[in-house]
Amino acid sequence: CILWPQINVKPNNQPFRLAMLVAARWKRKFSWIDLELDGPDHDPKKDAYRRELLQMPEIRLPVQLMTRPNILDVLEARLIEQLRRGTPLVPWDDTTPVVRRESGE
């Protein structure tokens, strides 16, 4: 997977800044994913509008996760889950198990 932090996108001429744009591939599945970090200034009222315009899968994580020593494992688990399920939105759940990458995947 490749992550581009703080990238600007402009669907339907409406500018947005994504926390991270992710190009993720797992087995034979590929997806562009909007990875958002919800901090103290996050306004959830704007999420539905952004989601509608972006038309891409979204993963939302609390910004506090960024200081965890296993953040890369957590992020990898969320990306694999997203690619397996193929759902448009995978909400964050702090009980999500960390999935380790198996060889060949």
Image (cartoon, grey):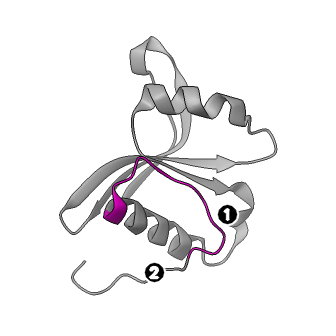
| Residue 55, image x, y percentages | 39, 33
| Residue 44, image x, y percentages | 70, 37
Residue 41, magenta (yes or no):
no
For this orientation, the residue located farthest to the bottom is 103
Asked if 37 appears above or below 13 in the picture, the reply is below
Quadrant in the picture for residue 76: bottom left
- Quarter holding the C terminus is bottom left
Question: What residue is disc 2 on?
Answer: 99
| Residue 54, image x, y percentages | 43, 30
Q: Residue at x 79, y 38 (%)?
A: 41
Asked if 8 appears above or below 38 in the picture, the reply is above
Foreground tag (2 vs 1): 2
Q: Amino acid at mark 2?
A: Val
Q: Which span of residues is magenta-colored?
A: 84-96
Q: Residue at x 25, y 55 (%)?
A: 30
Question: What residue is disc 1 on?
Answer: 66
Tell whether 99 sits left or right of 60. Answer: left
Q: Secondary structure at mark 2?
A: loop
Tell whether 66 sits left or right of 99. Answer: right
Q: Secondary structure at mark 1?
A: helix
The residue carrying pointer 2 sits among few (fewer than 14), some (14 to 19) or many (20 or more) residues within 10 Å by Cα, namely: some
Q: Amino acid at mark 1?
A: Met
Quadrant in the picture for residue 49: top right
Q: How many marks?
A: 2
Tell whether 9 sits left or right of 28. Answer: right
- Quarter holding the N terminus is bottom left
- Look at the image and tell me whether residue 8 can be seen: no
Cα separation between marks 2 and 1: 18 Å
Q: Residue at x 47, y 28 (%)?
A: 52
Q: In the depicted view, which residue is nearer to us: 33 or 92?
A: 92
The residue carrying pointer 1 sits among few (fewer than 14), some (14 to 19) or many (20 or more) residues within 10 Å by Cα, namely: some
